[in-house]
Amino acid sequence: MNNGKTIFAQVMEFLPMPAFRKCVARYDGDHNVRSFTCLDQFLCMAFAQLTYRESLRDIETCLRAMRSKLYHMGIRGKVSRSTLADANEQRDWRIFAEFAQVLIATARELYAGEEFGVQVESTVYALDSTTIDLCLSLFPWAQFRKTKAAVKMHTLLNLRGSIPEFVHISDGKLHDVNVLDLLIPEPGACYIMDRGYIDFARLHQLHQAGAFFVTRAKQNLRCRRRYSRPVDKSTGLGSDQTVMLTVAASAKDFPDPLRRVRFTDPETGKRLTFLSNHMGLSALVVAELYKARWRVELFFKWIKQHLRIKAFYGTSDNAVRTQIWIAVSVYVLVAIIRKRLQVHASLYTMLQILSIAAFEKIPISQALSQHETDVIPDDSEKQLWLL
């Protein structure tokens, strides 16, 4: 019998505990707490994410069945449904949001040299949002429509490693373009967005900060061509032009030249028009960058299928935000483990292994290496362009 640590405990050893304690202290998370600390709460919720628990009762039943192993998993407090529910309702969600940012910073360094299919030297981000539907009677604070509730998860995804660099949770009514006001532009970075983020005043702020963007032009775009560059039409490119906006309001908001690239998808025949402020890239790379935006859609699909962010353990705003941020933390933690242990398995395969081996007492590297690393087909090859 292996007398070592459980797989779950080994996973949690990759957490930077000094940083976690600082986050807890910053918001007095353990003030007047006798037994069930913020760390206990995080570990229980992380266990629920890794093992796909359906409810608080499910979490309580599973952990109590393994009561003798809880201490070695790092859980010191007594696990009960009511205690965990109270912790999710009352303890500030910003503790877990800031801790997730610490993990994201670690993952970014590890994946800095990761390739994503487009030959560019700068950091490339894809910005998008996903809507998580809720029951209006249970979540009245998140009213979206007259008979529907929802929250939005706005995400800025670093395409090198598919690491979420920025996550903002809002009610379903917040328009996507408003999230640009919350971003701190990174000079030299490239932001890939769909047409929902076109606001020329906000895009000009990115431009003035030294950042680049690639987006799809709306059909009612009015502009004047200054000059055209030659293109290889056998690649699907139709034109590569430098343009100036002509509508008075738009020209005032963005008075500098823009680049307009027309492209026809060879597989579907769809004609696409891209706008960018990056004049140094080839026209084909501009088109390929927009194609890479599909990765953020895959990220949303992945976490909705493999983590618990569609069914919630609590109904308050604080409980929902806490659960989403801990889910993001688990996703990034598994990505960190994958890189540090040099595991070739996909994140999906790793989660499947961790879910059934959480209480096993074997080295985590052995558990991950003894399984076949099936590669999940990349849907981005099937979905070339988002309309």
Image (cartoon, rainbow, N blue to C red):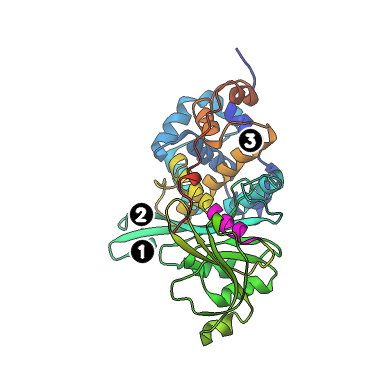
> Left or right of 149: which side holds 45?
right
Q: Which residue is mark 1?
A: 144
Q: Quadrant of residue 53?
A: top left
Q: Which residue is at 53% across, 23% downward?
A: 68
Residue 338 is tagged as 3
How far apart marks 2 and 1 lie (CA) works out to 9 Å
Q: Is residue 341 above or below residue 382?
A: above
Q: Is residue 194 above or below residue 369?
A: below
Q: In front: 376, or 144?
A: 376
Q: Residues within 10 Å of mark 3 (few under 14, many from 20)?
A: some
Name the N-terminal-most of marks 2 and 1. 2
**Amino acid type shown at disc 3:** Arg
Q: Which residue is mark 2?
A: 134
**Amino acid type shown at disc 1:** Phe
Q: In front: 18, or 293?
A: 293
Q: Which residue is at 54% across, 42% downward?
A: 41
Please name the predominant secondary structure of the magenta segment in the image. Answer: helix
How far apart marks 3 and 2 lie (CA) works out to 33 Å
Mark 3, mark 2: which one is toward the viewer?
A: 3
Give the magenta part as a residue range: 282-292
